[in-house]
Amino acid sequence: MKYLVLALAGSATLALPALAQATQSTPAASAASAVTVGANVVDNKGAPVGTIEAVNGANAVLSTGTVKASIPVASFGKGPKGLIVGITKADLEAQVAAASKPANIAAGMSVSGPQGNPVGTVESVNGDMVTVATANAKARLPKSAFAQGANGLVIGMSAAQLEAATKPAEVAAGMAVSGPGGAAVGTIESVSGDMVTVATANTKVQLPKTAFAQGQNGLVIGMSAEQLEAAAKAAQPPKTGGAGK
């Protein structure tokens, strides 16, 4: 069996750009209790936007079917057609596309979290990896974890969350693994030294222990099951024909 080794560098919960600044609370009643997985979301005019795919604390993952965005639960209102969010489907998809473009990253730049609170400073840039220094820790993140916000670089974690993610997670066989949106990825099949084998529904992937963070509900990595399986498939050597005469 072929295994894929990924160095995810503790970027477990950074796959989705935070778009809190892109949405505004609607005039509808507070809907915190109605923000649940599977709930339909419409814009202010009642046009469909998407559905809630996951809820993680104060943020909910909204899927339009084309893109996914992490949005504060407080940004949703409640209306006759379901949850209401102050942005259209087209605008949301456009903003996710814009936020997904690589940001201009250089040493010394300030980094903020999804609510605009300071996280730290870019200490160095090495290829596709960026070292961010907070008050108490340093974390290496991929460039894709950063978006260009109105006031500088933005990542999808607060300073406290980033520092917590840098701490080694307790990893053991049988533990469940989730992706950045809280969706199930798979299960830890075995641990050998610094390497961990994760079994998804369709494949097995070997990851370093540093790829795991301790989330609120268990282990978290920075990829969904689909992304992990696609990466494993892409890493397999191409099949060649038999050497028949």
Image: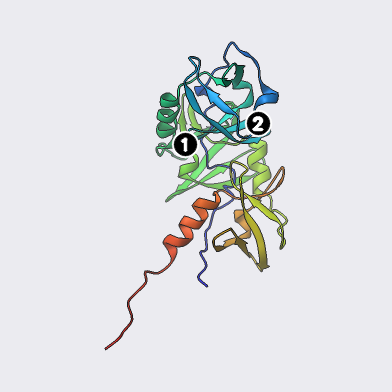
Q: Secondary structure at mark 2?
A: loop
Q: Secondary structure at mark 1?
A: loop
Q: 136 or 230: which is nearer to us?
A: 230
Alpha carbons under labels 1 and 2: distance apart: 17 Å
Q: 129 or 1: which is nearer to us?
A: 1
Residue kind at label 1, given as amino acid type? Gly
Give percent across and percent down for residue 42: 52, 22
Residue kind at label 2, given as amino acid type? Thr
* Quadrant containing the C terminus in the rendered view: bottom left
Q: Is residue 146 left or right of residue 56?
A: left
Q: Is residue 34 above or below residue 175?
A: above
Q: Is residue 31 above or below residue 55?
A: above
Seen as rendered, the residue at the extreme front is 80
Q: Is residue 144 left or right of residue 195?
A: left
Quadrant in the picture for residue 114: top right
Give percent across and percent down for residue 62: 54, 32
Give percent across and percent down for residue 172: 72, 61
Identify residue for label 2: 36
Q: Is residue 44 above or below residue 17?
A: above
Checking the image for residue 235, the label placed there is: none
Q: 117 or 91: which is nearer to us?
A: 91
- The crowding category of the residue bearing disc 2, from other C-alpha atoms within 10 Å (few below 14, some 14 to 19, many at least 20), is some
Q: Is residue 145 left or right of residue 238?
A: right
Give percent across and percent down for residue 7: 53, 57
Checking the image for residue 65, the label placed there is: 1
Q: Is residue 15 left or right of residue 198?
A: left
